[in-house]
Image (tube, rainbow, N blue to C red):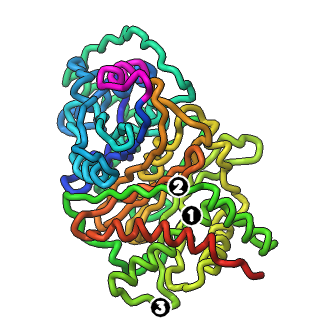
Amino acid sequence: MADRLSSLDASFLQLEDATTPMHVGSVMVFDVPKGGFDYDRLVALIAERIAHVPRYRQRIREVPAGLGNPVWVDDVKFDMTYHVRRSALPRPGSDQQLEELIARIQPRPLDRNRPLWEVYLVEGVAENRFAIITKTHHSLVDGINAVDIGNVLVDGNPTSRGGVMSTWRPRAEPSDAELVVGALADAVRTPSQIIDTVQHGIGDVTRTAKKVASVAGGIVSTLARASTRPAPESPLNATVGRARRFVMVGTDLDDYRRIRSRVTRSHKDLDVSVNDVVLATLSGAFRSWLLTRGEAVHGGTTIRAMVPVSVHADDSAPTGAQLTACFVDLPVGEPAPIMRLRQIAYSMAHQMGEDGAVSAETLMGLGGFAPPTMHALGARLGGVVSRRLYNVVVTNVPGPQLPLYAAGARMVSTYPVTPLGRGQALSIGLTSYDGGVYYGLYADRDAMPDADVLGRGIVDALAELVDTPVRV
């Protein structure tokens, strides 16, 4: 029997429109290896890897008369070359040109009649590099049956390996009659499956906690916590169009670690995390961004971030974790950078309570390159939590601190692309990898024409934290 989409996965299809496509992406930048890297090599690599993830050869099939949620069926006309595409940058192949290409590729909706993913090979990146851009629909990355395609493209092997012969053969699609019978049988077994998620809405945090999908690799259920207070008014909440901007920002992980160490030593009552330093950096960047816009910034000005955080489910099963939504009021009105960091650290510690956050080592030990999938799951959480509760989603996922490779090509940086929701002009994803922390700023093109200013603000705010002396 065909696998049926959960009500949550089906809701991502129903809520999708031309201005808010529900897919997540990533941008991975590589050095060209000595033997070169071309389109055929990428196709062979993907064909080998998706043999272990059958969902990438399946498409969505609707049930007649809407009697049940759609099902996954094998794509009998599966065409790898449709999903794996090729592009190139004109000279000089700068990061700005790559950002513009990403901003044009990512907003395009995925074809509902085919498996819901795409991969682009981008050649001609400056300094003898190339990039791989991925797009994967929310409904595909449910955390149990499928992971983001970026999760399986890279590994720790620096040598190119020969591919394996694919033995996949599609199963025949069910007939309309079989789909109807299957939907009715499922309705008898699980009556809640026929609840229309979109009509009933996911309006409050309690219901959200029951509806968000489970996570793969030992990370089990998802919870959300939030104040009932609506988020403050912000230019980050604006009508979203179809066009996007994308900004890549690379920083040094050691800077965050040094700041964390200095503040923790000086304030014995405060356990500062690298994630706290990231949020303090963003607070400083938002502060300077608002000031350049001429916005009123006073001592109480805040921007509320929804931050998905992985927490232990219990002490006996450290890999059994839950993805929890923390809601942090970033103190952008506070002029002192260390004070911003202290306020954020106290807020995060209060929300986490006794559920301790999963360590970076635990997340990195999930197998494969976990950050793309974790970003997708974080974005799924942001997609169902009531948007009146936050101004911006910030997903921060630690990655391995060792180099990874795709068919022998070394990955030098990686930038998440997390989708925008209705009324959300900006989303921020970041991944730490091999000594760097890489931000992907994805913004509405009209609401945030100055997204690059925010990007420069991140670099400046981090430098300010590094240079500011810590006083007890």
Q: Label 3: which residue?
A: 298
Between disc 1 and disc 3, whose residue precedes? 1
Report the span colored magenta: 33-49
> Is there a contact, CB below 8 Å, between mark 2 and mark 1?
yes
Residue 368 visible, this angle: yes
> Is there a contact, CB below 8 Å, between mark 1 and mark 3?
no
Quarter residue 362 falls in: top right
Examine the rendered structure and indicate whether residue 244 appears above or below residue 286.
above
Instruction: Give percent across and percent down for residue 67.
Output: 25, 37
Q: Label 2: which residue?
A: 396
Instruction: Give percent across and percent down for residue 216.
Output: 53, 37
**Image quarter in which the N terminus is found:** top left
Between disc 2 and disc 1, whose residue precedes? 1
Which element type, helix, strand or loop, lies under badge 1?
helix
Instruction: Give percent across and percent down for residue 50.
Output: 40, 23
Give yes or no for residue 134 being in the magenta stretch: no
